[in-house]
Image (cartoon, helix red, strand yellow):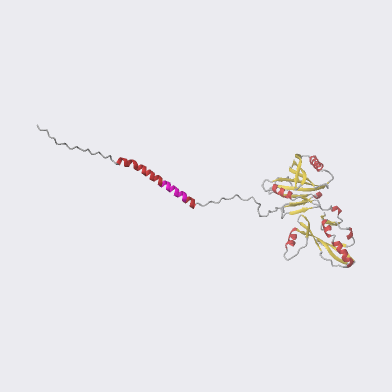
Amino acid sequence: MTISSAKTAPVILKKKSKPLLPITLAVLPLLLLGVTSFLLYQNLNLKKTQTKETSVPIPTLSPPSSSPSLLPTVDPSADWKTHSSSTYEIKYPTDFTFHLAEASTAILQKWGPTQKEGTELYDGISLSFEPREISTTLTNFTNSLIKGIEDQGMVEITEDPKSISLNNYQGLTFTEEGLGTFQHIILEKGSDSAFIHITFSISDPGNQGFEQIKNQILSTFKFTNRPNPNENNYLNSQLGFSLKIPSSWSNFYKVELSPKTAIFNFQTAGISYQLFTIHKVSLSEWETLKSEENTIFYGKELERDADKVFYFTQSLDNPLSGSEGDRYQDMSANINEIVSSFNIYR
């Protein structure tokens, strides 16, 4: 038996390659996530840049300034009527009724639509101003008023006297209840024993603002410093006024009267020439005189009495010479002092 010596060729086994598909599928989502995140980041930065470049600041509105208004303050009493005397002065609306009672007491009233005459006040406003000159203290004068009210009966003092200040004048106030509610205010002028007794009552069912009107009227009150009319030696009952004429004028003046004027003339040795004139006109006439165009008006207001106005005019030149001219000049120098003594005479 023959044994063959031929060699057997080795067999080489090829390795099997692993498939790439599972790896690709695993990596692809990560790549997509990364790309998407990058794109989102870029887009966000772009929007921020655009917002910064295109945004416009919005102005902030400041609150209204607290500085004073340039508009003038309207005085509600500018066109009101005026009542003045040797003791005090007040203003009141044109739609109020005015009555001057005894002891120079001024009474102001306005009725509401439901008020009936001759009854207690239930729709309206009423104020009275009574001047008093008496040598006593404010407290004693107030207590005497309260006693007089209580003595009348059917009246109760519901608020005792307490201090009050009105237009820088010091005083006392108290309240009574009877046929209505009445508040009293007593003001003291100063050291000359002059007082004003103010009484008012208000009922305003129609809400017509009577309380505010009352306050506005009281805000116009003031004491005056005119001379005592009892010292005046010239009384004119026709026009209703008085003056204090200097004794140096005796026998050198004469008054010429008309329904609206009192002309004070220099008078001597057949010479007569006007010194000054007191006029009494209606309020409407007074306003017309002041407003006439192309006219120089030299009248100066003295006093008002309800709807009447007293004013004076004065001669501005000296037509005389010699001793008459000197006397006329001296008398002219007294005119301002004379008219300052003017008082309404009744």
Q: Is residue 316 above or below residue 120?
A: below
Q: Position of residue 135 (x, y in %)?
A: 85, 45
Could you tell me if residue 259 is visible in this image?
no
Number of numbered discs on residues: 0
Q: Quadrant of residue 33?
A: top left
Residue lying at 75% horizontally and 60% vertically, measured from the top left: 286
Q: Position of residue 165 (x, y in %)?
A: 75, 45
Most foreground residue, 137 or 307: 137
Looking at the image, which residue sits at the far left?
A: 1
Residue lying at 87% horizontally and 58% vertically, measured from the top left: 246
Most foreground residue, 304 or 96: 304
Looking at the image, which residue sits at the far top?
A: 1
- Left or right position of 218 against 37: right
Q: Position of residue 265 (x, y in %)?
A: 85, 63
Could you tell me if residue 337 is visible in this image?
yes
Query: Start and end of the magenta stretch?
Result: 39-49
Specify the quadrant that holds the C terminus: bottom right
- Is 167 inside the magenta-drawn segment? no
- Left or right position of 134 against 291: right
- Left or right position of 41 against 114: left
Decide whether the magenta segment is chiefly helix, strand or loop: helix
Q: Position of residue 67 (x, y in %)?
A: 65, 51
Residue lying at 82% horizontally and 56% vertically, measured from the top left: 340
Q: Quadrant of residue 243?
A: bottom right
- Is 44 inside the magenta-drawn segment? yes
Q: Is residue 9 above or below residue 300?
A: above
Specify the quadrant that holds the N terminus: top left
